Image: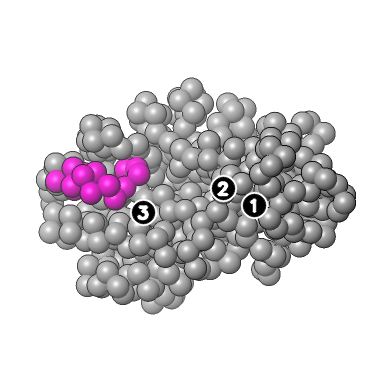
Amino acid sequence: MSQSETKPFDYIIHNVNIATLSDQYASEDNPYGVIENGAIGVNDGLISYVGDSFDKNDSKLNATETIDAQAQWLSPGLIDCHTHLVYGGNRANEFEMRLNGVAYEEIAKAGGGIISSVEATREATEEELFRSAAKRLQSFIDEGVTTIEIKSGYGLDTENEIKMLKVAKRLEQEFPIRVSTTFLGAHALPPEFKDNSDGYIDLVCNDMIPKIAELGLADCVDAFCESIGFSYTQTERVFKAAQKHGLKVKLHAEQLSDQSGAGLAADYKALSADHLEYLSQDSIDKMAKSGTVAVLLPGAFYFLRETKLPPMDELRQAGVPIAVASDSNPGTSPAQSLLLMLNMACTLFRMTPLEALQGVTINAAKALGLEDKVGSIEIGKKAELALWDIDHPNQLSYQLGGNNLVKVYNSINKK
């Protein structure tokens, strides 16, 4: 017991099975770090006791509120570490066109593709973007997500990128969820820079990043390093500008081809490199050395009907932390369920249920630089917890559809 006899816990959850997802409690025979018939005590929004449960008459059961979990399962709150949740419009018509055999190039020429999302986002007011994103965000909260990353990247000019990040910040202010914001100005080439990608990167590095850093709107800077995105050299320019202004970096890398982007990200100590279907062994080795998290996005893989799998065995053998995220976005993964991504990670990428759950808890926290605060159940971490009516944590990856969430216990209370 880590508290004094005179100060009660704010609340205790007891008679609960705990999947801590913590190395402190995990072993070869207990990989989820399970404490059966356990208890958790919380003070000032922090976990201050993790251990055996109490008898109802135990003198140690000293709390303002005691909660009998009735032998249900408690996990860390889930973390979605890669989303594009704020955008205008949708691309359902484009989805139907693709399935009717229309090539992406034709769709783009007809005004579709990412540029259609850019146009809709630019046209939308801040309030309109907030309302549409709020509906999507609530879907994740309803599944036990307590931390979410939200990127910009559909404004592609200074004013509209700032507008998107302000919406993301407002979502955190008005909903009971932690939001990590990422500036993704180097997402695509806007129409006004159609034949001048270097000029656009000048704008990103010399105008957007300094202003966004000054306003405190972003925790991190991202880019899309790809044959249809930005080059290795342009991406490095973005990284240098970000780090000059004290911002951490991450990267969309190796989704469609090997551009050595993940290796570049590792060279700059990036928090994560994401997608990674075409990841090379050299980049894997660099990621292992730098601690850069591999964020896998099965929703995009599924939605685009991709066939090239991320190199799972090589990532495991190198000891690279692996996270899973929804990539929620209007064009390639219009997903609003992180639980579904757990099942997809297992069925499509052959992850184990344990790996998938680690991928939306402790490893997702690492991908956001938040592993000291959230992602596992340990003394001193934030009390951001999800209670489930399940028989075992592997059920979270097994089940297709439905929602076994009972309640979220969260130090963030805004609604």
Judged left or right of residue 307, residue 121 is left
Which residue carries the number 1 mark? 10
Callout 3: SS: strand
Residue at the spot 78% in from the left edge and 31% down from the top edge = 28
Which residue carries the number 2 mark? 44
Q: Residue flagged by tag 1: what amino acid is it? A: Asp
* Residue 340 disc label: none
For marks 2 and 1, give the CA distance. Answer: 7 Å
Position of residue 223 relative to residue 152, above or below, is above
Region rendered in magenta? 207-226
**Which x, y percent locates residue 96?**
43, 75
Judged left or right of residue 130, residue 242 is left
Q: Which residue lies furthest to the front in this view?
A: 6
Quadrant location, the N terminus: top right
**Which x, y percent locates residue 300?**
48, 56
Which residue carries the number 3 mark? 151
Dots 2 and 1: beta carbons under 8 Å? yes
How many numbered marks does the figure carry? 3
